[in-house]
Image (cartoon, rainbow, N blue to C red):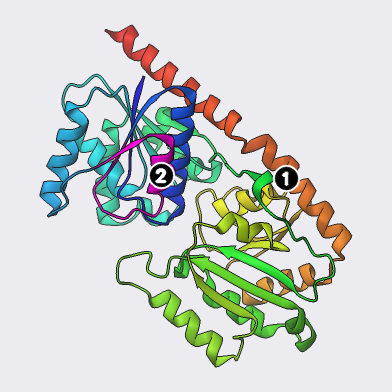
């Protein structure tokens, strides 16, 4: 079986990382895998190279060339399955699916944003989803949004969580011990929806004693949209305004993020909206306590007692969650991390996730054969 994994680029983003993870797992399962992009960013390319997966980049000189190049590549391939990630690639893949073809198309919902169903551009994209054979969401929250807003596609919807691939035995852990500070790592791009401003406001509300022991390290892409660093710039200015430079450190993204997270005392994510939050899932798999806002499938995650919840639209609520973390003794934090790992192993393990994809592929192709 041949699978084309299609997204815009191999930039340092959560969606790109997850599609790369899936491509590597598909390859290990014995599938023939190609990777298709239209924008040259190679942050994750080495992972595909190591797995022996060829990356094809089609023409991106202008939008119309991109449409025709993607359509030509997909329709002249011998693929059985095309799997696209992100809104524009979903749209381009749906355009490629117009007309007779033998392959099956799976588009995805990764963000769970309400604007997916409201803006004029996205309503056009939604209309073309009729050419997709399956819409896979990476959270139950996202699937429910689709059912409510696009009931005409209800029979196409399915949720499959992201697989979490971490070679934990290669990571050096440094959990609490005799450290004088408690370090929270936030692996997220610098966007307003990731809530850096409210987080910085919340940190500024902490008591002087709490500020003495907390350290925040944020790692992410400074320009998630090319040339747009406004959220990062505003965050830097606010850190400077409140004189928090010795507490809040804002870093560029790193390919070493799992090593960084393994050294943390907790993982934080304070977004206002998310699909499945990779940072949370990865932190759970690394046996870390999680401080997170009530987003995505947080009810599922909080079935482990290792989650500290807060409201995304309230700096005071975020401050209270940080204070709770700082006042929790280290033995309980270690138990919280272990509880998170047990749940993560059960619902995010690569073996479990890849089997769900395998069953979906076979079901789709068997149904197709039955109609021939």
Residue 204 appears at what percent x and percent y?
65, 85
Residue 199 drawn in magenta: no
Q: For the residues carrying marks 2 and 1, which lies nearer the camera in this image?
A: 1
Residue 49 drawn in magenta: yes
Q: Which residues are magenta?
A: 35-56
Element under disc 2: helix
**Which of 266 and 31 lies nearest the eye of the viewer?**
31
> Which labelled disc corresponds to residue 149?
2
Q: Is residue 204 visible?
A: yes
**Which of 11 and 231 lies nearest the eye of the viewer?**
11
Quadrant assignment, res 121:
bottom left
- Return the disc, 2 or 1, that comes first in the chain's sequence: 2
Residue labelled with disc 1: 341
Quadrant assignment, res 203:
bottom right
Where's the C terminus, which quadrant?
A: top left
At a point 65% along the width and 53% down the height, the residue shown is 283
Residue 213 appears at what percent x and percent y?
76, 79
Q: Is residue 231 above or below residue 340?
A: below
Q: Is residue 218 above or below residue 337?
A: below
At a point 80% along the width and 76% down the height, the residue shown is 180
At a point 49% along the width and 57% down the height, the residue shown is 255
Q: In the image, 112: left or right of 316?
A: left
């Amino acid at each position: 079986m041949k699978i084309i994994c299609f997204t815009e680029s191999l930039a340092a983003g959560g969606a790109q990382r997850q599609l790369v993870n899936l491509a590597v797992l598909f390859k290990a399962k014995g599938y023939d895998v190609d990777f298709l992009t239209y924008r040259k960013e190679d942050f994750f390319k080495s992972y595909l190279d190591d797995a022996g997966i060829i990356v094809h980049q089609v023409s991106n000189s202008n939008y119309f060339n991109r449409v025709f190049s993607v359509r030509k590549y997909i329709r002249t391939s011998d693929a059985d399955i095309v799997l696209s990630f992100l809104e524009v690639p979903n749209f381009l893949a749906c355009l490629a699916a117009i007309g007779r073809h033998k392959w099956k198309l799976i588009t995805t919902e990764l963000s769970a944003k309400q604007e997916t169903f409201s803006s004029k551009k996205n309503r056009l994209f939604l209309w073309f989803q009729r050419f997709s054979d399956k819409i896979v969401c990476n959270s139950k929250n996202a699937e429910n949004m689709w059912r409510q807003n696009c009931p005409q596609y209800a029979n196409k919807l399915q949720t499959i969580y992201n697989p979490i691939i971490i070679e934990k035995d290669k990571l050096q852990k440094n959990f609490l011990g005799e450290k004088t500070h408690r370090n929270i790592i936030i692996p997220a791009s610098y966007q307003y929806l990731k809530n850096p401003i409210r987080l910085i406001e919340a940190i500024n509300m902490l008591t002087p004693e709490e500020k003495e022991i907390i350290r925040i390290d944020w790692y992410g892409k400074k320009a998630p949209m090319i040339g747009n660093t406004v959220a990062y710039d505003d965050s830097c200015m606010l850190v400077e305004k409140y004189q928090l430079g010795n507490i809040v450190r804002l870093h560029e993204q790193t390919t070493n993020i799992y090593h960084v997270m393994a050294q943390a005392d907790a993982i934080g994510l304070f977004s206002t909206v998310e699909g499945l939050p990779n940072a949370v899932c990865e932190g759970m798999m690394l046996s870390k306590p999680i401080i997170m806002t009530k987003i995505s499938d947080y009810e599922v995650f909080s079935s482990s007692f290792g989650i500290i919840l807060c409201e995304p639209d309230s700096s005071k609520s975020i401050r209270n969650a940080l204070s709770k973390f700082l006042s929790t003794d280290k033995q309980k934090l270690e138990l919280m991390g272990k509880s998170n790992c047990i749940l993560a192993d059960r619902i995010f393990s690569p073996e479990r996730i890849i089997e769900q994809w395998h069953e979906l592929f076979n079901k789709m192709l068997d149904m197709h054969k039955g109609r021939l």
